[in-house]
Image (spheres, helix red, strand yellow):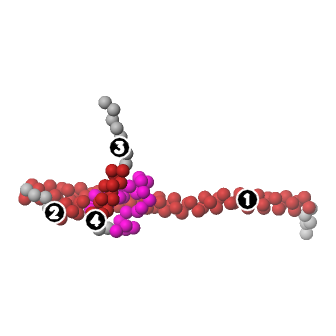
Amino acid sequence: MVKKTKKEKIEVEETSVKSTQEEKPTETKKDKNPEIFSRIFYTILFAFIGWVSLWVFTFVVLIQFGFLLITGQVNKNLKGFNQEVGLFLYDMIKYLSFQTNQKPFPFRDWPYSEETENQNNNELNQQSTVKVSK
């Protein structure tokens, strides 16, 4: 058995104290990581869902043009559906661009009502506009 001197014991204790002090800042980093990884996961997920939703939106617009050419009128059901898809895309873009932390549809009610539309319109009106000088 090797006996440790007092000096060696003190050095071992100091290094253990230093290592525990160094670990504390990493604990705060670990607390933030789940939020960041969660945000990254939802951002990728909603970006993909948004891409698919945009194609659905475009397809319905083309069908609407078909109705307009054939009947001379727009289809009210398709118009309402595209309005809801547009509001969904708007909410998704707000989340993806870090304008809000509120996640869209599966985490929020789907049937976008007039109340949701009014809320979105109020948010748009509250944002400052850029003034162009002549």
The kind of residue on which mark 3 rests is Thr
Of the image marks 4 and 3, the number of the one nearer the N terminus: 4
Q: CA distance from mark 4 to mark 3?
A: 26 Å
**What is the CA distance from the residue labelled 1 to the residue labelled 4?**
53 Å
Q: Earlier in the sequence, mark 3 or mark 2?
A: 2
Q: Compared to 128, does 34 lie above or below?
A: below
From the image, state whether disc 2 or disc 4 is nearer to you.
4
Report, in whole angstroms, how far the alpha carbon at label 1 lies from the one at label 2: 66 Å
Picture disc at residue 54: none
SS of the residue at dot 4?
loop
Among the two numbered marks 1 and 3 on one chain, the one whose residue lies closer to the N terminus = 1
Residue 76: which disc? 2
Quadrant including the C terminus: top left
Q: Which residues are magenta?
A: 84-109
Residue 52 can be seen, yes or no = no
Give the residue number, with chain letter if any, for mark 1.
21
Residue 129 at x, y percent in the picture: 35, 43
- Residue situated furthest top in the rendering: 134
* Element carrying mark 1: helix
Q: Circle 3 is placed at which residue position?
A: 129
Looking at the image, is mark 1 or mark 2 earlier in the sequence?
A: 1
Q: CA distance from mark 2 to mark 4?
A: 16 Å
Residue where numbered disc 4 is placed: 113
Sequence-wise, which precedes: disc 1 or disc 4? 1
